[in-house]
């Protein structure tokens, strides 16, 4: 089996190799083909990935390709993790939003819109390539914002795509830890969109509902989040457990203030970490590569959500580098293993709705528990969204639809409407000013007309 990785210069590629190595006996991987537009960083991540493969016992051929056609041709799976414009573009996305008094974040709000406009156009180009040279391949997509990218490719290409994100599984693992239970022994009733999801039930193997017990205990609620993102009373009133990205929607003012107080956005912090990482790797012997890389992961994990939630205060300890249940590499590996299994495995994924959430259109991209096996990926029917979150769910989905329309049609009108619809932007004058500034910063990468109509 050949697996292509598009965007392989990304810093989490070696993590992916670690996960694939653990699943090598079940997957039968013959070749891993790497492609990225940043050839220098691709070579560096290729070195680290080769060292990771060697340590993990993965004997597959690792090919650093000179063009995307070479990488994709003949692939069974294409894993995509694209960031058009690199980390520098993310910094601009976040800082432009912050300059207008808005939440500055990579995947939500104004910054998420700009990221989506650049990435969706590029991903649609890759989709055309996959349709041509690997039409039977399944695309496993990490490219952010996963929900908008999935919405675009599901409705404007013929590729088979599943959107993957580590947030739901990490949420499930934190809940299980709070309850003192093994996450593999629990069933999670979950629904929403990518980075906009809620847990509305947790059941054990006896089908006993555990969420009421959790919601009645302030201590257990606090254990469900790495930072104090949500007041206990808020969660108890909501009656659901939101994933951490709902913090930006429920408490945008706090996220904005904390980011401003910290003096830098998350993108800026990661940019500095990445610069230090690649500087060290450039002069490192092969024997040092993994140690340097894992130290980078520890620093990055320790600072996760700290800027937005605590103005930069890092937590002690933190998540293990390699989890058996959750994590970037775990979700991708789990999907590939499930697609090669006769047994059904439940995995939260972003897929075509097919009326699983009754409030949304059949062709909308939604994030739901799916039954995954060699027979395919089938989202579980969840009925209507809870009344407490239905309005927000519908509003964000309409924003996603408008963003896709803006990109596909190069429509300034749809772009402005998307930003006005976005709960984290809203006002037309602010939306117009932000859109103008993004177009000045990125030009044709935004895939819009050159003049913004206010």
Image: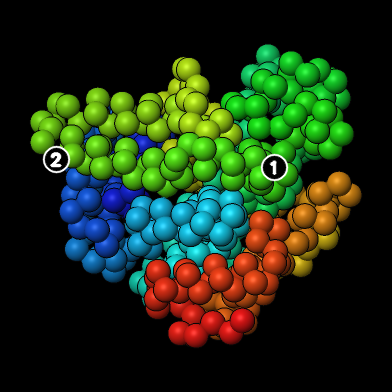
> Where on the picture, by quarter, is residue 351?
bottom right
Please say whether residue 369 is visible from this viewpoint: no
Please say whether residue 392 is visible from this viewpoint: yes
**Front residue of this view, candidates 382 and 166:** 166
Separation (CA) of disc 1 from disc 2:
41 Å
Q: Position of residue 1 (x, y in %)?
A: 35, 51
Q: Is residue 211 left or right of residue 49?
A: right
**Front residue of this view, candidates 344 and 125:** 125
Q: Residues within 10 Å of mark 1 (few under 14, many from 20)?
A: some
Report which residue position mark 2 lands on.
282
Report which residue position mark 1 lands on.
251
Q: Residues within 10 Å of mark 2 (few under 14, many from 20)?
A: few
Q: Nearer the viewer, mark 1 or mark 2?
A: 1
State which tag comes first along the sequence, 1 or 2. 1
Q: Is residue 296 left or right of residue 267?
A: left
Q: Quadrant of the C terminus?
A: bottom right
Q: For the residues labelled 1 and 2, say whether their Cβ atoms are less than 8 Å apart.
A: no
Q: Secondary structure at mark 2?
A: helix
Q: Position of residue 114 (x, y in %)?
A: 50, 64
**Front residue of this view, candidates 201 and 222:** 222
Q: Secondary structure at mark 1?
A: loop
- Residue that appears at 48% across and 59% down: 96
């Amino acid at each position: 089996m050949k697996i292509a990785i598009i965007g392989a210069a990304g810093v989490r590629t070696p993590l992916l190799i670690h996960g694939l190595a653990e699943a090598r006996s079940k997957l039968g991987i013959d070749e891993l083909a790497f492609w990225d537009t940043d050839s220098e960083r691709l070579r560096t991540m290729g070195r680290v990935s080769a060292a990771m493969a060697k340590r993990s016992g993965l004997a597959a051929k690792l090919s650093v390709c000179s063009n995307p056609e070479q990488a994709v041709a003949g692939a069974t799976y294409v894993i995509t993790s694209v960031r058009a414009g690199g980390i520098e573009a993310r910094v601009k996305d976040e800082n432009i939003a912050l300059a207008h008094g808005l939440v500055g974040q990579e995947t939500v709000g104004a910054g998420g819109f700009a990221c989506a406009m650049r990435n969706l156009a590029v991903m649609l180009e890759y989709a055309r390539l996959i349709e041509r040279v690997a039409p039977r391949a399944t695309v496993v997509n990490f490219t952010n914002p996963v929900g908008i990218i999935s919405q675009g490719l599901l409705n404007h290409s013929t590729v088979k795509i599943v959107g993957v994100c580590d947030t739901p599984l990490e949420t499930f693992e934190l809940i299980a830890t709070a309850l003192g239970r093994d996450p593999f022994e629990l069933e999670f009733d979950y629904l929403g969109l990518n980075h906009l999801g809620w847990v509305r039930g947790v059941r054990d193997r006896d089908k006993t509902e555990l969420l009421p017990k959790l919601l009645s205990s302030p201590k257990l609620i606090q254990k469900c989040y790495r930072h104090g993102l949500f007041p206990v009373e808020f969660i108890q009133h909501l009656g659901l457990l939101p994933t951490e990205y709902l913090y930006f929607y429920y408490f945008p003012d706090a996220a904005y203030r904390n980011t401003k107080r910290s003096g830098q956005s998350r993108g800026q912090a990661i940019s500095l970490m990445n610069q230090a990482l690649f500087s060290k790797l450039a002069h490192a012997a092969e024997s040092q590569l993994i140690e340097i890389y894992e130290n980078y992961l520890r620093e990055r994990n320790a600072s996760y959500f700290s800027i937005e939630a605590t103005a930069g205060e890092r937590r002690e300890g933190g998540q293990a580098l390699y989890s058996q249940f959750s994590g970037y590499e775990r979700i991708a590996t789990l999907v590939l293993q499930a697609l090669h299994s006769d047994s059904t495995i439940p995995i939260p994924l972003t897929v075509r709705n097919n009326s699983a959430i009754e409030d949304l259109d059949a062709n909308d991209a939604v994030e739901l528990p799916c039954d995954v096996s060699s027979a395919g990926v089938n989202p579980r029917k969840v009925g209507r969204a809870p009344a407490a979150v239905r309005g927000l769910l519908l509003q964000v989905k309409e924003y996603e639809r408008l963003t896709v329309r803006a990109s596909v049609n190069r429509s300034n009108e749809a772009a402005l409407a998307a930003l006005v619809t976005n709960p984290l932007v809203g006002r037309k004058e602010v939306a117009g000013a932000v859109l103008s500034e993004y177009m000045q910063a990125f030009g044709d990468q935004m895939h819009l007309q050159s003049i913004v109509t206010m």
